[in-house]
Image (spheres, rainbow, N blue to C red):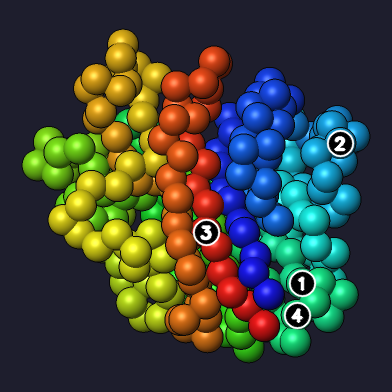
Amino acid sequence: MQITLTTWNINSVRLRMGLVERFVQKRNPDILCLQETKVEDGKFPTSDVRKLGFDHIAFNGQKGYHGVAIFSRLPFEMIDKREFCMKGDARHISARFGAAAGLKKPLTVHNFYVPAGGDIPNRELNPKFGHKLDFIAEMHAWFGSDFPDANPRSILVGDLNIAPHEHDVWSHKQLLDVVSHTPVETEAMKAMIAEHGWIDVMRHFTPEPEKLYTWWSYRAADWLASNRGRRLDHIWASPTLTNAARSIEILADARGWEKPSDHVPVTGVFEIE
């Protein structure tokens, strides 16, 4: 069966529910994963989400910060939330789909919001950067331990806050000392992908040296004219889904919508039995 899945850092789901509705009307994904929802679970706008046709909703939130959610037209078999770095923040949620969703074998979708890391790329001077590095290390360790057995068919999406390749940023040279593209971050992400066999689906369809961006800073007076973007949002597939991906779309136009997020939706289409 064909599954259309979108990841999007929405930067407050309640503030931008109108943009979510606009996107759903435009692309109609089966599964929509949001990051930085910025709302505690008791105040999540579930009724608004159901009006968009998503009967299955899972979220992991906290007041004012972070938060992740999965909206689905397909029924969930199981929901899981994992805490990283013992911080008590809401940065991961996963949903498993099975026979009720029309699949022969289970599929798990993991939705991550990796810490941004602050402005100074030094863990001694900036605890936020240390937190980011520790978070990535803990993800890496999990992928090497009990993760494969529990997640044989997986798609991992989210705002991972790292642009790993030279052409994932507008200027590799100028951003080498900027958080999200420093060597310690990019090497850690590349190692995680390589060692665990993840398929970077966006780069599978659009190899380097073509530029790919999913985020443009609010600080730019004219984001489109300057085009100083970074690829911070990702869709990865496990090795068992090597041939499942059919297409990828980055909806850059969404950055120009009224009161936009600084991230744009990324949509993957998969053929999964």
- Mark 2–mark 1 Cα distance, whole angstroms, equals 22 Å
Mark 2: give few (<14), some (14-19) or many (20+) Cα within 10 Å.
few
Question: What residue is shown at x 39% (from left), y 54% (from top)?
Answer: 133
Q: Position of residue 41 (x, y in %)?
A: 83, 39
Q: Nearer the viewer, mark 4 or mark 1?
A: 4
Q: Amino acid at mark 4?
A: Leu
Whether the residues at callouts 4 and 3 have beta carbons within 8 Å, the answer is: no
Measuring 74% from the left and 41% from the top, which residue is drawn there?
61
Tell me the amino acid under the disc marked 2: Lys
Q: Earlier in the sequence, mark 4 or mark 1?
A: 1
Q: Please give the residue where the numbered disc 3 appears in the rendered image.
A: 268
Q: Are marks 4 and 1 in contact (CB under 8 Å)?
A: yes
**Comes first in the chain, label 2 or label 3:** 2
- Residue at label 2? 51
Q: Mark 1 or mark 2, which is nearer the start of the sequence?
A: 2
Q: Are marks 2 and 1 in contact (CB under 8 Å)?
A: no
Q: Which residue is mark 4?
A: 103
* Amino acid at pointer 1: Phe
Q: Is residue 208 visible?
A: yes
Q: Nearer the viewer, mark 2 or mark 1?
A: 2
Residue at 66% x, 51% y: name it: 29
The residue that mark 1 highlights is 97
Indicate the amino acid at tag 3: Gly
Which callout, 3 or 1, points to the residue nearer the camera? 3
User: Would you identify the image quadrant in which residue 213 lies?
Assistant: top left
Marks 2/3: CA distance?
23 Å
